[in-house]
Amino acid sequence: MVSPERDQPLPRATVRIQNERIVQIVQSPAGKRPSGTQVIDAHGLFLTPGLIDGHVHLGQIPGMLPDQERAHPDIATAARAQFPKSYLYFGFTTLVDLASSRAALASWKAQPLHPDTYFCGGVPVMDGYPSNFFPQAVRYQILPFFLVESGAAGLPQGIDAAEHTPQAVVASMHAQGAICVKAFYEHGFGANHDLPVPSLASIKALVEAGHAAGLPVLLHANSAEAQEFGLQAGVDIFAHGLWNWREGYSAAALTPDVARILQGVVDGRRGYEPTIQVLYGEQGLMDEKILSDPRMVKALPASLIEWYRSAQGQWYHDAFAKREGIAPSERPEDVDAGAIVHVNQVVSFLAQHDARLLFGSDTPSDETFANPPGLNGWLEIQRLAAAGVSAAQLFRAITIADAEAFGLSRDIGTVQVGKRANLLLLNADPTQTIHAYDKIEKVILAGRLLDPATLAADRPAATPRPAAR
């Protein structure tokens, strides 16, 4: 048994589960078993907590717009039924959607099998990022917890500023069951590069309101300006790595400016989700071989992969290339190359300074089909390790650190009596090697034993049973 609160694995452990929770852990056979007990012989394997992805977005099919879903209902239905299984296939038994609502998650939670799922209320400033991506007629319904800055004039009809103060939006999302608050500091990109950002006073008030309600506050922030703002505002968690430096991409080594900000992150014990795979997902969008990657068929239904290959399914590839000015001759590995150098430098610094690293994949970060559910988290593990995060640091980030950051540690994050039985059986010790996550033997979700082979998108179709006579 390998659990992050323990200095060493517990050999020859017997773990008993009843009513979805762990009720006994002993270092020997458990003695007489109650009648009807199911026994899993895990000799030679490693029992660990299930993995937590603390940064997902579950309301969309990546790269498929609502009108495209309506035009291809069979593909969309297959995708939405598969995505919860894809997260479980790669070992993620708990997810946190960082910009959602109770109503928006209803269809996800209606799936018969899905990871434990929680949400943050996303708090953009009115008409700022990311609400600017949506037509004004619907953006206030899609992201209902937006802020109206004090003194704002000319509000759209039906918008009451009193309902969109920091205190009001936190109260609203808390009443819906949110476990966290996510603010945004993003000027935008492409044609939309001068979007409004919140004032420091507003985010300080949001942090105060969030803490009064017992909710951690996260900040979408991938620039030096944004992360410095977050330190001043007192946010608890940065939801991205710092890849946009004030010096542009000319500097490869950490600059004094960036090092100062990162030291503030370390000293303040701010949580930090690097989300490196976001950038590789944009590279993947430009890589014509990405949809032929054999791992894709584990996460995405074949019908969806084929649609992505179609002219209609390539719409975001074309839009992204146009927005970023990417020529057809440009190599995929050149996309975001400078930002990738930056974020790897940042993660290396944080790992060396024992920062409070958290795990989040930002799946999907955009409309790209190169960040598939579940697989994107596995890829983020590889990116973090390559950037200098040790296997032990990663194991802690993806289990107990995420559980503590989101206020879930009473239930998940460790293998302990009383905890929810969200567990994995692995072939190797994940504190020693990230290859432990390459092949998961069994997934246990609230005490329910799942075979990963039955969760993969390319699983064989069930053989029909003969009719009863």
Image (cartoon, rainbow, N blue to C red):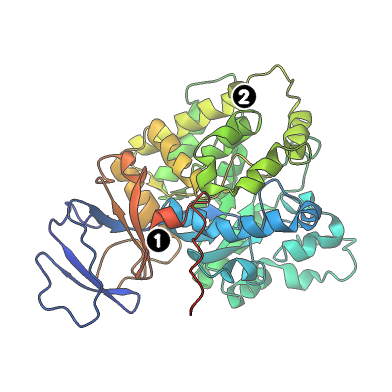
Task: Indicate the quadrant where residue 94 lies.
Answer: bottom left
Q: Residue 463: give x, y in percent of width and height.
A: 49, 61
Question: 254 or 294: nearer the eye?
Answer: 294
Reading the image, the residue beneath label 1 is 403
Reading the image, the residue beneath label 2 is 332
Q: Residue at x 63, y 63 (%)?
A: 100
Q: Is residue 136 visible?
A: yes
Determine crowd level at label 1: few under 14, some 14-19, many 20+ residues with C-alpha closer than 10 A.
Answer: many
Question: 91 or 418: nearer the eye?
Answer: 91
Q: Residue 346: give x, y in percent of width and height.
A: 46, 33
Q: Is residue 400 visible?
A: no
347 versus 221 height, above or below: above
Question: 319 or 426: nearer the eye?
Answer: 426
Label 1 SS:
helix
* Residue type (three-letter) at the residue carrying disc 1: Ala
Alpha carbons under labels 2 and 1: distance apart: 35 Å
Q: Residue 464: give x, y in percent of width and height.
A: 51, 65
Q: Residue at x 64, y 68 (%)?
A: 107
Determine crowd level at label 2: few under 14, some 14-19, many 20+ residues with C-alpha closer than 10 A.
Answer: some
Q: Residue furthest top?
A: 329
* Residue type (three-letter) at the residue carrying disc 2: Pro
How many numbered markers are drawn?
2
